[in-house]
Amino acid sequence: MNHEYKCPCCGGAITFDSDIQKMKCPYCDTEFDVQAFTEHEDISGEAEELNWEKSAGREWDPGETDGMTEYACNSCGGTIICDYTTAATKCPYCGNPVVMMGNVSGVLKPDLIIPFKKSKEDAKQAYFNHLKGKKLLPDTFRDKNHIDEIKGVYVPFWLFDSDTKAHLRFKATRVRHWTSGDYYYTETSYFSVIRGGNVGFELIPVDGSSAIPDDIMESIEPFDISEADSFHTAYFAGYMADKYDVDSESSKERANTRIRNSTTALFRGEVRGYNTVNVEHSTIRLFNSNVQYAMYPVWILNTTWEGKNYLFAMNGQTGKFVGDLPMDKKKYWTRFFIYLVIFTALILAAVFYFSA
């Protein structure tokens, strides 16, 4: 098969110049030592797909799910697991009524669980702190009876471990400016910078539920895994647990993306002294990979306003709180016209004063 060598600087076809015994680009006149150019070509492959070697979760022991039941949401399709004493009348994600299904089935037993450290009162206080200073917020969001619907939910996460072997090539530039006589000069020098090495990743979390947006879950990270315990059903008492509907196999793509981005950023940070640095090619391979199944604590409040769903979440371990808030357009225009009337009155008073 034919192979055309490309100039790392301008992308044009490059050839070996026998006169100078180097690779030389006829378009930008950049010269490369043959050995350096060969090493450059050796790592020009695109990032490979990352594969995981082990499966997560375990089978439940006989009798271990006694006293646990499932509720199904007919609106968003979410399935919630809780003990039989928990009143689950509404889905914590969309606010619609849920229907009792019966015994827990078709789900693996978690390997790890991080217990709730923040109480429901902590979640309520965090919510009200989140509302402070929001003058145009709809009154519905300040309804204390509504706040009582905050629910503690254990959210399923897949935790990925892996060692990586990475080779990356960056295209970097240095720019120099100077003036000579009446002329202003700019010189741009191009460099091919190679970085590589091994990096280990532990417990990269990927949300295993499609009922809650991934950006919400990632926004309340991190969770302190050092406080995790081996799973016991007793931790579910008084709380709900989301039943995963995205398995570990389907979660690999997000784990791969997070690891690839983190690896690239790490080595990018080691390229210093240049004006610009861009990734040209990368090869990232995984080995010693593993995945575990864990449950993380989250306080969740769902609110529907003007047909749109608003979801608020708080890390049940650290207290980190996130959620979007709407603007009440009626309040906005009321305030706008009040301020307009006051401003107009002040202008008219000033005109009358200076014309008198």
Image (cartoon, rainbow, N blue to C red):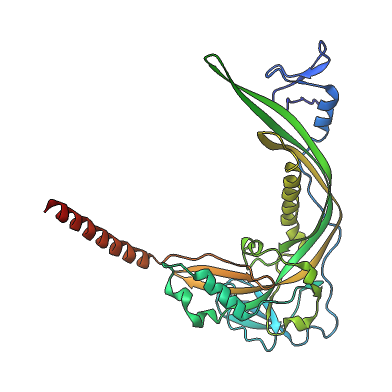
Residue farthest bottom in this picture: 85
- Tell me which corner region of the image, top left, top right, bottom left or bottom right, holds residue 191: top right
Q: How many marks?
A: 0
Most foreground residue, 120 or 25: 120
Residue 331 position, x and y percent, is 36, 67
- Tell me which corner region of the image, top left, top right, bottom left or bottom right, holds residue 16: top right
Residue 141 position, x and y percent, is 48, 74
Residue farthest right in this picture: 288
The answer to whether 93 is drawn above or below residue 355 in the figure is below
- Judge whether residue 9 can be spotted in this image: no
Q: Is residue 230 left or right of residue 97?
A: right
The answer to whether 134 is drawn above or below residue 73 in the figure is above
Q: Is residue 145 left or right of residue 255?
A: left
Query: What residue lies at 74% left-to-right and 26% top-to-bottom?
Result: 6
- Tell me which corner region of the image, top left, top right, bottom left or bottom right, holds residue 93: bottom right
Query: What residue lies at 77% left-to-right and 60% top-to-bottom?
Result: 249
Residue farthest left in this picture: 356
Q: Is residue 124 left or right of residue 116?
A: left
Residue 248 position, x and y percent, is 77, 63
- Judge whether residue 323 can be spotted in this image: yes
Residue 152 position, x and y percent, is 65, 78
Quarter holding the N terminus is top right
The answer to whether 47 is drawn above or below residue 150 in the figure is above
Query: What residue lies at 38% left-to-right and 65% top-to-bottom?
Result: 329
Quarter holding the C terminus is bottom left
